[in-house]
Image: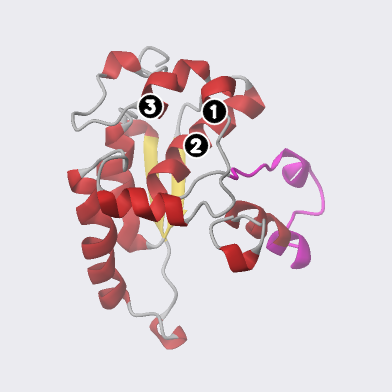
Amino acid sequence: ETRPAAGPSNEGSSYFRVADAMELWPSAGTVRSRTTTEEFATDSFQNLLFSICRFREVTGHYPTKITTVSFSFKQRRFQEMHAAAMQWPADAFHFIGVDPSADTGFDLKASSEGEAQNAAQPFERDPYGCSSPILKEKRKGRNPFSRTPPYSITCPEMMELLNWCGPDIIPKDRVPWSDAR
């Protein structure tokens, strides 16, 4: 639900619907019935943070490892910035970079330059995306329906991290996974 023209439909659910339409689910097993989506994130930091909470909502516990699949040029942002800002253990975070081939028109060099300038740099200065005017406006603009994530209620152990605004990184003992390993 990050674009008014798209209506009240979110990115995560759209991937679920694509998997349905393309019949990508294994015919045997329970993968589809165990698949869930996160519907409130408005940027990459929130994608990771809110997905951790969504996992806890569904399973009753926090994940022990996270694997993120995205364009390769986003690896540094997810691994070295977002996961680190959440004090997620480095050995429990894995990133798989997947890029379209050049014959699709995908320009890895241009995408990498755009990543550095428009995504990585703002998060370097504002790890939690809550004080920089650029990142605050991005979040506001990507929430056209004024939705409020429920995670401070459904994941109360994460409340301090959900509200942390830096500029310092949250202390490790303030996140719920600090003693879970």
Q: 102 or 152: nearer the eye? A: 152
The verdict on residue 29 being magenta is yes
- Residue at 28% x, 54% y: name it: 134
The crowding category of the residue bearing disc 1, from other C-alpha atoms within 10 Å (few below 14, some 14 to 19, many at least 20), is: some
Question: Which one is in front in this view, the residue at disc 1 or the one at disc 2?
Answer: 1
Amino acid residing under circle 3 = Asn
Question: Which quadrant would the C terminus be assigned to in this image?
Answer: top left
Q: Provide residue 162's location: percent of width, then percent of height.
A: 41, 28
Q: 111 or 164: nearer the eye? A: 164
The image shows a total of numbered marks equal to 3
Identify the magenta region.
Answer: 18-39
Dot 3 or dot 1, earlier in sequence: 1
The residue where tag 2 is placed is: 50
Numbered disc 2: secondary structure: helix
Q: Provide residue 14's location: percent of width, then percent of height.
A: 65, 59
Numbered disc 3: secondary structure: helix
Amino acid residing under circle 2 = Phe
Colour mode of the rendering: secondary structure
Residues at marks 3 and 2, CA–CA distance in whole angstroms = 12 Å
Numbered disc 1: secondary structure: helix
Where, by quadrant of the figure, is residue 65 drawn? Answer: top left
Q: Pointer 1 and pointer 2: residues touching (CB < 8 Å)?
A: yes
Prevailing secondary structure of the magenta residues: loop
